[in-house]
Amino acid sequence: MTPPLSDFHDAKFPLHTHATCDCCKQMRRCAGPEEGSMKLARCKECQVARYCSRECQVQGWKGGHKDECKDFQNKRNNAVLASGNPRAWAEFAQWREYHHDSITNAALSHYIMGGKGSEADYTLHILLLYQNDDSLPVERKFRMQGCRFVHKTLSYAPDANYDPQHLIPPANTMRALMMFRQYAARDLQERTGARRPPRMGSYLLTLKFGPPGILEPAGLQPFFRIFAFADEHLRAKVNEERLPAQILERIFLKGRKQRFCCGKIPGMPSCCCGGWTHDKRNLAKQDESDQETDGDQPSMQLVPGTF
């Protein structure tokens, strides 16, 4: 029996993304058979948005990225102030892209357990601590300090003394996330012509860039994203041996990528994953590597990712 591609659940096709222009939504893997035929450039100021052309960048700026970019620049400045590292925010942007699929599948596990409609009321909230260590690769730059599946009504008042250890986000952050989720669901429905709004999940990352035990000069920095999934994902079975938070913590610690593939595109020389998902792995060596770090913990079905 083929092991599941995801350690969070046994869905045939785990949630995953491909490099995409944030304006025209064209995926790099669909641009053409020639490798490198489509290059995505990051927004120089925020390091988050990516575009395939100057035209898309200008259109994206006019279409709403202007306000978002200013918010990200503010978070960038706060990250630099707290950490003393001018690349702190850029490293987060790259780290988040690398681990996005793992985070969305962790959130999906909770939505599977919560049942249909739970995505409208809950989000996965993760508290992360920046590792200001030049010897670490970007994919291991953040450690998980806590994780909680939070209802939208469980939040602190804006003027309350926010304690991140309870993993309850401020009310204004939760409100902004839920409003963004509703807008994205309507936009996707209009673009696809679907009869009903798509299922749209979310996750919230609360970032601490300064050293442990020291208050952030401008407070902790929130960052949230939404993602779509299908009814068939809700029929998957979740991992009954480990909680999603336990799996995520290990993935972040080791800098791993989940295995995934959605097949080939006509005219393309390779499949979705480029082949690495289907490579035969030396599971014995993988188990030994995991045991060196985790003692007698059971090994996960993971393979190292490229970054």
Image (tube, rainbow, N blue to C red):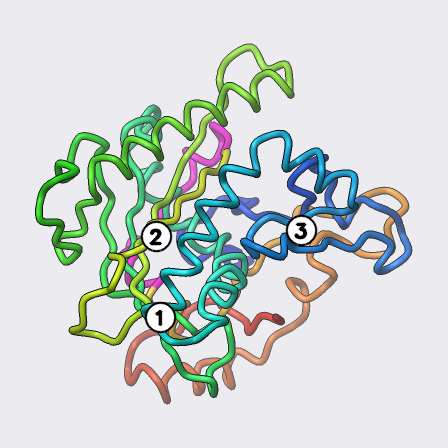
Alpha carbons under labels 3 and 2: distance apart:
21 Å
Q: Look at the picture and state if 201 lies above or below 284.
A: above
State the image coordinates of residue 103 (x, y, percent, origin top left).
Answer: 42, 53
Total number of numbered discs in the rendering:
3
Question: Where does residue 158 sit, x and y in percent of width and height?
Answer: 17, 38
From mark 3 to mark 1, how far is it between C-alphas?
A: 24 Å
Residue 85 image offset from top left, x and y in percent: 43, 75
Q: Which residue is mark 1?
A: 130
Q: Quadrant of the C terminus?
A: bottom right
Instruction: Name the amino acid type tagged 3.
Output: Ala
Q: Is residue 100 left or right of residue 158?
A: right
Q: Which residue is mark 2?
A: 205
Residue bounds of the magenta highlight: 229-248
Sequence-earlier tag: 2 or 1: 1
Residue topped by disc 3:
19
Characterize the local packing of mark 3: few (<14), some (14-19) or many (20 or more) Cα atoms within 10 angstroms. Answer: some
